[in-house]
Amino acid sequence: MNSVQPASPVNGTPLIGKLAVYGVGLIGGSFALALKAAGAVSQVVGVGRSRANLDAAIAAGVIDAVAVDDEHAVADADLVLLAMPVGQMGEVMARIAPHLGKSTVVSDAGSTKRDVVELARRHLSASLSRFVPAHPIAGAERSGATAARADLFRGRHLLITPQAECEPRALSLVRAAWELCGMRVSTMDAETHDRVLASVSHLPHVLSYALVHELAGRANGEQLFSLAAGGFRDFTRIAGSSPEMWRDICLSNRDVIVDELNRYRAELARIEALLNAGDGEGLERVFAQARDARNRWLSIR
Amino acid sequence: MNSVQPASPVNGTPLIGKLAVYGVGLIGGSFALALKAAGAVSQVVGVGRSRANLDAAIAAGVIDAVAVDDEHAVADADLVLLAMPVGQMGEVMARIAPHLGKSTVVSDAGSTKRDVVELARRHLSASLSRFVPAHPIAGAERSGATAARADLFRGRHLLITPQAECEPRALSLVRAAWELCGMRVSTMDAETHDRVLASVSHLPHVLSYALVHELAGRANGEQLFSLAAGGFRDFTRIAGSSPEMWRDICLSNRDVIVDELNRYRAELARIEALLNAGDGEGLERVFAQARDARNRWLSIR
């Protein structure tokens, strides 16, 4: 055994020899840092659109090298993580497919899963059985390699949506890697994933963007913002998220998000009816049920 | 000059000899603590529904005594602050009106102003010209006397909505008291106040309550909450607010809140049209305008 190899959680051999990260931002970069901190990876190469970001990633010790091309990035990689916005996923899959090694496992960190699975079926051909669709649920209001941190995923949920043809070895590797990052891993089907995330993540983002957009467009927008306080700041925090990323999520999951919007608009119509009727008891009941549900959630979180 | 009097910012005489606080919660209690910290009040008496809360307020040094009745509370008070939910305001005004001293100034801390002004006109009779409607805009997710802190109002906005018949001396006293609490004071009419607050506070609260209520009522509510993350937590923080307080605000400002809800639902309909059309450019434009407006706000806040 070579004593200069990184410390390892299993038998002194790192789980992953070479990791290739496509999209070295908050998620991809934090995955690399967490695996390095766990001694679970020997070498990390990065690929991305912005050379400045990749240089910053090297300077911060997030990646060890920038791959010269896709072949050098993935041919001898044990694991390839696709961590760019979902809108770029198909093109990158098509680019790497011809170069993927016979045992290279591919995974992703996309916020939607039905579309990613469909893209993998279309583009990954021979490597499809070694593709493991996954979604680490971790806050992402900051972005870029310099925002990456080894503890970003600790205690958070990872959802894997494996396909029928997935090789058990590939699934195990991806599960083990994210568990070493501190995540709680569950599996579900891609359809369920996209519905659940539409409810608790995609819909709230749309609602928050909508409020800020609507108020900012008014003639007295500046007065309104000048008198907004802490409640408004927290409600709209997610309206500070990346427009590009959320455009892609909304496009790829739009049928479900439209369903969610309709359910939500129906709830608003019910509340409006209570307001119009001056039904204080009814309003207080809605508010109290919401507060209690949220407090229960916080208490077991 | 009596040397045992508290230190004072003006000529050694406290701005307020006796302050009576009705509703010794987060807002009323913090007002008392801030004025004490500024050496601007000699004595604070408290009145409230819960004896336990008043005892806790004495123990915490928020108030000096519990008034035995309304007459003892207000007859010789320089300032009476009404800091209970708006729904109780009318009853309390009717109770204290017969006992108010000839120079006693009355103010409130209600979140809505048209209704408070109307109640004052109905109930305060001879003291109406010494009533100064005001609204300190300060976060209030915690409640009760023990949540009070002297620095709650520092740097925040106070909105005063004075009526035509308001005595200049009364207006000056209320303005000076809140300025000593560290607030930035502006005046506007009650109608404008209620419209602005509906946009940046009342509507977001309704939207946040609505989301939590709608999701909690679903068969898979527990699964949904179990996979909610930090964005959901912040978006729904205001759904942890007091249902009683928000019932009262919604009832008293319901015409304006219904207007706001309709504008918001129209915005959601526009976003839904972009989703249905698969208009990625349009979605990204909405999201980017919202993000940029929010970032501008944060940068000058």
Image (cartoon, coloured by chain):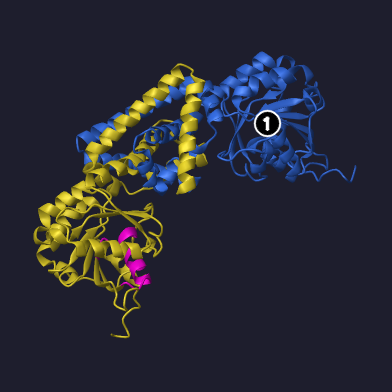
Chain colours: A blue, B yellow
Q: Amino acid at mark 1?
A: Gly
User: Bounds of the magenta span?
Assistant: B21-40
Vertical arrangement, residue B62 with respect to residue A41, above or below: below
Magenta region includes residue B186: no
Residue depicted at 29% across the width and 85% down the height: B2
Q: Is the magenta region chiefly helix, strand or loop?
A: helix
Q: Quadrant of residue A85?
A: top right
Element type at mark 1 = loop
Which of the image's four quarters has the N terminus of chain A? Answer: top right
Where does residue A28 sit, x and y in percent of width and height? 67, 35
Rendered location of residue A286, percent (x, y): 31, 39
For disc 1, the marked residue is A23
Q: Is residue B47 visible?
A: no
Quarter residue A83 falls in: top right
Q: Is residue B146 left or right of residue B295?
A: left
Q: Nearer the viewer, residue B103 or B269?
A: B103
**Chain designation of label 1:** A
Q: Quadrant of residue B263?
A: top left
Image location (x, y in percent) of residue A228: 38, 46
